[in-house]
Structures are given as C-alpha cells and as structure tokens.
Amino acid sequence: MPQHLSLLRSLAAGVVAGLTMLAGDAAAQPHSAAPTWSKDVAPILYRNCTVCHRKGGMGPMPLVTYDDARRSAGEMRDAIGTGYMPPWHADAPHGTFSNDRRLADAEKNTVLAWIDGGTPEGNPADAPAAPVYPSSWQLGTPDAVLKMPEPFEVPAKGTIEYQYIEIPTNFTEDKWVQAIEMLPGAREVVHHVIVYARPPAPPAGAAPPPAAAPGAPRTPPLMFFNEAHLAQQEPRDPNRPQRRTGPMIAGMAPGTEIQYFPAGTALKVPAGAVLTLQMHYTAHGHAMKDQTQIGFKFADGPPAEEIRAGTFVNNAFVLPAGKADVEVPSEVGFRREVKIWGILPHTHLRGKKWEYRVVYPDGRTESILSVPKYDFNWQTYYMFAKPVVLPAGAKIEARAWYDNSAANPANPDPKIDVRWGDQTWEEMQFTAFLYTIGRP
Ligand code: HEC
C-alpha cells in the first residue's frame, strides 16, 4: 500500500479508536488502541510465526521484518481470522496441551487491529531483536546422531512411495531418551518422518525365555482391545515386503521437528535397537538428495517414570466408494493405572475428524481430545499439559470419520472401497500414544 494511503488509514484507525475509548470500551482493547508493528506485532510474530516463517523455514514466506509483515498483511488477516494459522487442529481450550500453537485471543485481536489500522510501523527502536534460529540442531548438541546410511534421491516430480530406511543404533547399553529431533538434509522435500525403534532380535541359538512355573499365576497383558476392530487376517499383498519396525517412538512433521518427553519421564531405547524411518518425500520441482539425521538428547539416568509408546488401531474397516461420512471406532483398555501424556491421531487423505473419550470403570465418560478438522499434512502429537490418569479398568474410545466422496478434494480415488493399508491411497485408523504405568 502506498505510504500516504497507509498513513490515512492509520489516522482513521486512530479516530475510530478514540471514539471507541469515548464509548467506554477501553478495557476491551487488547493493547494500545492503535497497535504498531514495532511495539505490538513483532513480538507476537516472533513468538508464534517466525519459527516457520523465515528464510529457510517451512512457511511459504518470511514474516520477520516490518516489510515482510506489511506485504503479507492481507493473507495474514484471513489466515489468522479463520484460525488457519498458526496450524493447530484440536479444539480444546488453551492450556490443555503444552504444545498448543494457537494465538491467545488478545494476540489475535492485536494483529487484526494492526492490519485494520493500516499496518503502521511505529518507532523501529521499539521493536525487539529478530529471533536467531540455529541453522542446525535446535535442541543443542545432541548426545547421539544417527544418519540415513545413504542419501535418497528425490525425483523432480511425481509421487514418491514411502521409504522405509533402517539405521542400526549400535547403542551398547540401554539409553534413556529425553528428546528426539529430526534434521532433514533437504527440508524442501521431507514432508514427514516417523521414527520406530525395534529391539534387537535375540542372538541365533539363544535359549527361549523361561516358561512360567506350572501353576504360577500369569500376569495378564497391560492392554486389552476390542476384537471386532481387529482383522483376524490382515489382507496381505504378497508383493509387498513385511516390515517389522517395532513401536513408533516419534512422529515429526516440518515445524514439529522435536519430540520432547515430559520432565520426569524418559523413553528407553534398548541396546542394539534398530531405528526405522518412514520417510514421506514430496517432489519439489528439481531433483534433490536427502540424508535425514536423527539426534537424541539423553537423560542423566533412569527417570522417575518410564515413558512408553503404545498404539491401537482398527484395521477391519471398509470405507464404501463415494461415501462422505464413515465413522470408524477403535479402543484400548488398561488393566492397571496408566497416565496418558500425549496422543497422535493418524489417518491418510480421507480422514477428516477425530474424537477420543475415556470411559471410566464406573461408566462415566470424559472427552480428552477432539480434532474437528484433521489434516494429514500435520502429524501432531497432542501433548497434555497435565497427563490424563486412567484407573485400572478404564479405556480410551477413539472415533475417526472419513470422507471417501468426490467432494473431498484430497481423495485420491472416490470410486474404490478403501481398506487398511500403509499407502496414502489406502487408509488407517491408527493412534499412537505416550504413557507411563502407575501403581499396581
Ligand atoms: C509450524 C509452522 C508454522 C507456524 C508456526 C505458522 N505457519 Fe503460517 N504457514 C505454514 C505453512 C507450512 C504454510 C503453507 C502451507 C499451508 O498453507 O498450509 C503457511 C501458510 C501461511 C499463510 C498463507 C496462507 C495462504 O493464504 O495460503 C499465512 C498468511 C501464514 N501462514 C501466516 C502465519 C502467521 C501470521 C503465523 C503466526 C501467527 C503462522 N503463519 C504460523 C507454517 C506455519
């Protein structure tokens, strides 16, 4: 916008703000009545946006300087006004999740008022220093770094099948992990990474685990599932290799490169474990090579509580061709007290919504996570600010909804019935969760 116009608009905004104050609404104003970039907006963008919107970040444009912000003001108005940005898809109040990216209402109102007021710069001397982002590891120097053994060549265009890449840890002792970071070699083409850790196979010829003494009570497994949700015989494509990946330990998409385990907890990666990276690459117009690295921060010693990674699924569903609103349930129950620290819902391109509720042994229910607009592009671990404590006998019921109709623009093919499978044109009803085990 030409300088004089923006001046006019800010003057007008000043008049409006003055009138509003006369009307006695001053308390409702989020900040100074006519917010400026230097004083009011830059701190908000630096706290909430520039981690992605900077040179080399994943956002499509930088929002670091006054000119950056002014240039994108129109788009910012829409993106912030609709809640599209910052990206966050659960609808619980602020404070429920420790990694919530959303703006507080006051911050949102300040940015919108600044845009409506003609994007005044204010006094540049009031602006905070632009944040400095490390060009390499964000969690500091990792205690261990594991790198894909070979670079992967990402073609210039076309769809790229998921790559499953194994990396032996060569850890000679069990490690207690406090944080895991992925560092893509070519950020532009790495859409997401899922990290699994498989304990080593027992050495060939090793003695089988000792059989329980006859008559000794058997400890039942911690978790129980609903058999109706589990395919007795998973349909297998004989041409597809069987993968044994072990449990998923971190799910990371651009913008959420670090998986932190909450204070007082740590995750054990056993000696000799092998990592499998599920790499989702997207072509970027020219051929590129990627060699992603995984960095670990270790805890000083065993934590107060061992965090574990669990999953539960429904792999027995069919999404009929063309159907817009198919609900698929799944559940997991616990025979001992557990604390749930985080939940990651996962479907592919037809998934549109998720809900999770706890059913307590006395029949009471409580909603713990609702994702009204699930977006496959963001693989988010929703980390509870306070873990959800489930007494023995409680269960988590999950429901996912799918749109297999032509009205879903992401649908790869509305004309086929869709079942469980690991390709994006197949579907999943998959939940990963982080938990600790409570009192017996
Ligand atoms: C976690 C990373 C991340 C954060 C944090 C983030 N963005 Fe974005 N933003 C993106 C990505 C990726 C895109 C492009 C893909 C898309 O549109 O979903 C985008 C797109 C946008 C767009 C363009 C939308 C359009 O019209 O296509 C705007 C405007 C925007 N962001 C503003 C913001 C603002 C303002 C903030 C902070 C209040 C913010 N973003 C925080 C990652 C982020």
Image (spheres, rainbow, N blue to C red):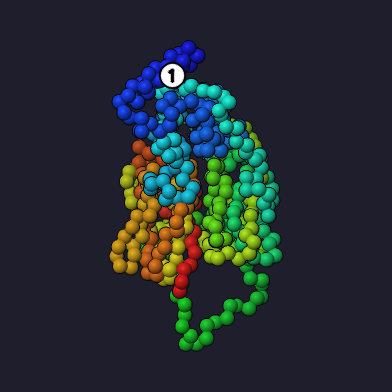
Q: Quadrant of residue 61?
A: top right
Q: Is residue 272 left or right of residue 317?
A: right
Quarter of the image where one finds residue 11 = top left
At label 1, the amino acid type is: Ser
Picture quadrant of residue 233: bottom left
Q: Is residue 18 left or right of residue 130?
A: left
What residue appears at the point 32 percent right and 24 percent down from the top-left corner? Answer: 22
**Residue behind mark 1:** 10
- Which residue sits at x=49%, y=47%? 99
Task: Give residue 377's position: percent from left, percent from top.
Answer: 48, 42
What number of labels is visible? Answer: 1
Q: Position of residue 76 (x, y in %)?
A: 46, 29
Q: Nearer the viewer, residue 318 or 101?
A: 101
Q: Is residue 56 visible?
A: yes
Residue sitting at 34 percent across and 65 percent down?
Answer: 360
Q: Secondary structure at mark 1?
A: helix
The image shows residue 144 at horizontal and vertical percentages of: 68, 55
Residue farthest to the bottom, as pictured: 215
Quarter of the figure with the C terminus: bottom left
Q: Does ligand 1 reach within 8 Å of label 1's beta carbon? A: no
Query: Which sits in the foreground, 264 or 55?
Result: 264
Crowding at mark 1 (Cα within 10 Å: few <14, some 14-19, many 20+) = many
The answer to whether residue 400 shows anywhere in this view is: no
- Measuring from the top left, give residue 411's x and y in whole percent: 41, 41
Q: Is residue 172 left or right of residue 348?
A: right
Q: Is residue 381 above or below residue 300?
A: above
Q: Nearer the viewer, residue 299 or 421?
A: 299
Position of 158 relative to 362 (above/below): above
Name, please, the residue furthest toward the top: 4
x 53%, y 65%: residue: 305
